[in-house]
Image (spheres, rainbow, N blue to C red):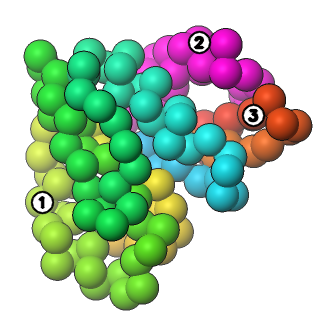
Amino acid sequence: MPVTYNLAQIDEAVQYIIKNAKNNVLLFYGEMGAGKTTLIKALVKALGSEDKVSSPTFSLVNEYHTPREPIYHFDFYRLEDPNEALDIGLEEYFNSPGWILIEWPQKIQDFLEENFQKIEISIQNENTRTLNLC
């Protein structure tokens, strides 16, 4: 069931994701400017981290801390060779505790498992987005 939200409602959208995600690996699909990083910032906060969240476009992965478990935030937008993801230990991250949040997962499609939670974000207008858990 799609959820439509604006920036003022982003916390409700995040709670919907937390409550309905089928596992802790979340794959964020959406065009440039759809709000993937903005949604991830709100999600990291809702999961209990006080760390500053920024897109790991150049480092590929950022780690955030919570009282319970780590959160790993990947951004594969600039990835040219999917094997670079393996070089940074992607498979070990998949087997670690905590949340794994991946922007531009289509760049590493061959390494993704069917049971990972896909989240599609689409732009409705300048202020409104729709997310769909697939």
Q: Nearer the viewer, residue 59 or 97?
A: 59
- Tell me where the magenta segment starts and ends, as one range: 1-24
Do the numbered discs 3 and 1 sit on residues whose CB atoms are within 8 Å?
A: no
**What is the crowding at mark 1: few (fewer than 14 residues within 10 Å), some, or many (at least 20)?**
few
Q: Amino acid at mark 1?
A: Glu
The image shows residue 67 at horizontal and vertical percentages of 12, 16
Q: Quadrant of the N terminus?
A: top right
Q: Mark 2 or mark 3, which is nearer the start of the sequence?
A: 2
Residue behind mark 3 = 130
Image quadrant where residue 44 sits: top left
Asked if 1 appears above or below 79 in the picture, the reply is: above
Callout in the foreground (1, 2):
2
Residue behind mark 2 = 12
Q: Nearer the viewer, residue 52 or 72?
A: 52
Q: Mark 1 or mark 3, which is nearer the start of the sequence?
A: 1
Q: In the rendered view, does 58 fall on the left or right side of 14?
A: left
Q: Which mark is residue 57?
A: none
Is residue 18 in the magenta section? yes
Q: CA distance from mark 3 to mark 2?
A: 12 Å
Residue behind mark 1 = 92
